[in-house]
Image: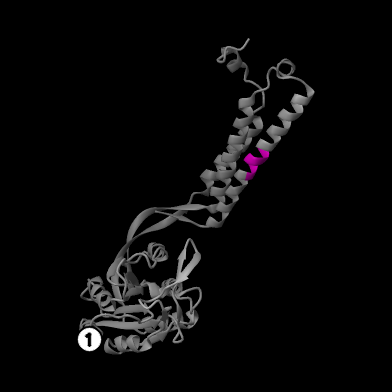
Amino acid sequence: MYQLEKPIFFYLLFAIVGLIVIFLMVLIWKRHSQKRFSNGIALKKLSPDRSFFKAWLKVLVLTLAIASLCLALVNPKIGTKIETVSRAGVDVVFALDVSKSMLAEDIAPNRIEKSKQLVTQIINSLGGDRVGIIGYAGSAFPQVPITTDFSATKLFLNNMNTNMVSSQGTAITEAIKMAETYYNDEDQVNKVLFILSDGEDHEGNISIIANEAANLGIQIYTIGIGTVKGGPIPIKRNGILQHYKRDNNNEQVITKLNTETLIEISSKANGKYIDGSNTKKVVEEVTAILNGMNQKEFEAKQFTDFKDRFQWFLGLALFLLVLEVLLLERKTAWLKKLNLFNED
């Protein structure tokens, strides 16, 4: 396992592109100037030891030195051992609505991106909790199982979109049923499910499913994404608006936040409805809810004792820089004697 302390320094790798561009421009300028001065045969006699290969080799060595220096600044760290550590927390599952109505832009930048922002910020505020993610539209699917790996969770979260489920609708009941399979620890006192949705187009008997979840000890908190006023559903291709979704009567569909459904779910499952419009308030409220719960201790394996490895790349960069200085743009004597190219 490794960590990158300052990945922002990877942007310095663009200097390699600039170096190659400058080298090619200088090379073209030199050839143009040499042609004005004399022909190729005369130039070869005037500078017989000049090596075209060495010039490219010097650029290659310099680019490798820059790449090594960038890696040294990034400071990669490698975990040297795995330890089993005790953590205390709550099993938290997020059910994210990925139906087409979540493309509405009545809340910036749109409903699904707002949902992902909220979940990311909530995960950033967690301590020893375990998290899982479920996606749902016309059907539900597991996106991330219960885990303590927050980095991987956020990575999979960012890849969620409205094209992940072909069947449309909002099968909240299926999402709740799937969440029940996530809590595999019978000793876990508190099991929490956060549903992020606009509450539209729900299918099935939500009250019965929510009651079943409550009987299994699962508390459901719903987070409303969108506005009561609502907005149209944009259909885009490569980020460019093509048209707005229309119904069978060719009328523009306006999707609105259905708070009644979300309040009903949370009330039946001993939870609470949360307005998702203000990210800071949502994170504070969710954090307060989780901090007020009894936490279960569990064991987790993780890499520990991360050690810096920038020294390797810094040493390599210095070696390559010295090598670049020592390389001369003339043919090597012993290589010239081999006459590999049958030169006169």
Instruction: Please state which amino acid type lies under the numbered disc 1.
Output: Asn
Look at the image and tell me whether residue 271 can be seen.
no
Look at the image and tell me whether residue 343 can be seen.
yes
Q: Secondary structure at mark 1?
A: helix
- Magenta segment: 18-23
Q: Would residue 29 be counted in the magenta stretch? A: no
Q: Quadrant of residue 210?
A: bottom left
Image height check: is 108 above or below 157?
A: below
For the image, the number of numbered tags is 1
From the viewer's perspective, tell me whether residue 12 is left or right of residue 127: right
User: Foreground: 324 or 178?
Assistant: 178
Point 63% across, 17% down: residue: 333
Residue 191: x and y in percent read 28, 78
* Location of the C terminus (image quadrant): top right
Residue 232: x and y in percent read 45, 77
Name the image colouring. Answer: one colour
Point 49% across, 49% down: residue: 309
Image height check: is 48 above or below 112?
A: above
Q: Main secondary structure of the magenta part?
A: helix
Residue 3: x and y in percent read 45, 56
User: Foreground: 188 or 174?
Assistant: 174
Image height check: is 169 above or below 344?
A: below
Residue behind mark 1: 211
User: Foreground: 76 or 198?
Assistant: 198
